[in-house]
Image (tube, rainbow, N blue to C red):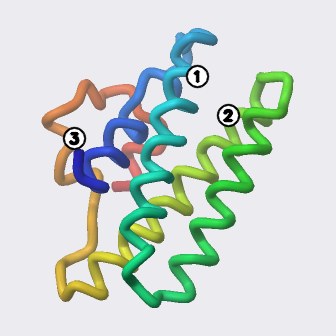
C-alpha cells in the first residue's frame, strides 16, 4: 500500500468517530505502526532532515498513545502521530516534485461523513 493510502486508511478510520470502540482504536494503532514502518523504509534512501525529525515525533506520539490507559489522551497522541506522518509524506512528495497530499481529495473513497474537523477542509 502506498504511503498516502496508508495515511488515509488511518485518517478516515472509525477510531475518529464518537462511537469508536476499543477495537477500533487498537486497529488504528496497528495501522499507524505499519504506516510509520513504511515511512521509515521510504526515508532510508532520502536525506530529508525535517522528515526524519517528524518521523521521530510521530513514533514518540504513537508510543505515548500505546502506553496510556486509553481515553482522550491516547486518542490525542494517536492523532498527533497521524499529523506528523502526514508532514513526512508531504516532505517525501515535495522531494520527488509531486503535489502535496490532501486527504480531502480521497474522501469519496471512505465513509468520511463523520470525520472530525471535516468542515475545515
**Which of the two discs, 1 and 3, sits closer to the camera?**
1
Marks 2 and 1: which is nearer the front?
1
Residue holding disc 2? 75
> Label 3, label 2: how many angstroms apart (C-alpha)?
21 Å
Determine which residue is flagged by label 3. Answer: 107
> Residue 1's x, y, as percent?
23, 45
Which quadrant, please, contains the C terminus?
bottom left
Label placed on residue 67: none
Q: Is residue 54 above or below residue 74?
A: below
Sequence-earlier tag: 1 or 3: 1
- Above or below residue 35? Residue 31 is above
Give the CA distance from mark 2 to mark 1. Answer: 8 Å
Residue 75 screen position, x and y as percent:
67, 34
Real-space Cα separation, disc 1 to disc 3, in angstroms: 20 Å
Q: Which residue is rendered at x = 52% and y = 24% of the image?
A: 15
- Asked if the residues shown at circle 2 and circle 1 are in contact, with their CB atoms under 8 angstroms apart, the answer is yes
Q: Position of residue 112 (x, y in %)?
A: 29, 31
Q: Which residue is drawn at 25% across and 25% down?
A: 111
Q: How crowded is mark 2: few (under 14 residues within 10 Å), some or many (20 or more)?
A: many
Amino acid at each position: 500500500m502506498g504511503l498516502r493510502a496508508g495515511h488515509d486508511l488511518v485518517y478516515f478510520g472509525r477510531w475518529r468517530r464518537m462511537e469508536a470502540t476499543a477495537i477500533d482504536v487498537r486497529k488504528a494503532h496497528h495501522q499507524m505502526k505499519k504506516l510509520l514502518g513504511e515511512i521509515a523504509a521510504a526515508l532510508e534512501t532520502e536525506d530529508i532532515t525535517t522528515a526524519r525529525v517528524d518521523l521521530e515525533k510521530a513514533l514518540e506520539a504513537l508510543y505515548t498513545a500505546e502506553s496510556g490507559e486509553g481515553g482522550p489522551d491516547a486518542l490525542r497522541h494517536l492523532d498527533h502521530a497521524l499529523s506528523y506522518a502526514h508532514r513526512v509524506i508531504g516532505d517525501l512528495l515535495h522531494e520527488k516534485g509531486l503535489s502535496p497530499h490532501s486527504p480531502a481529495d480521497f474522501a469519496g473513497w471512505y465513509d468520511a461523513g463523520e470525520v472530525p474537523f471535516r468542515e475545515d477542509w
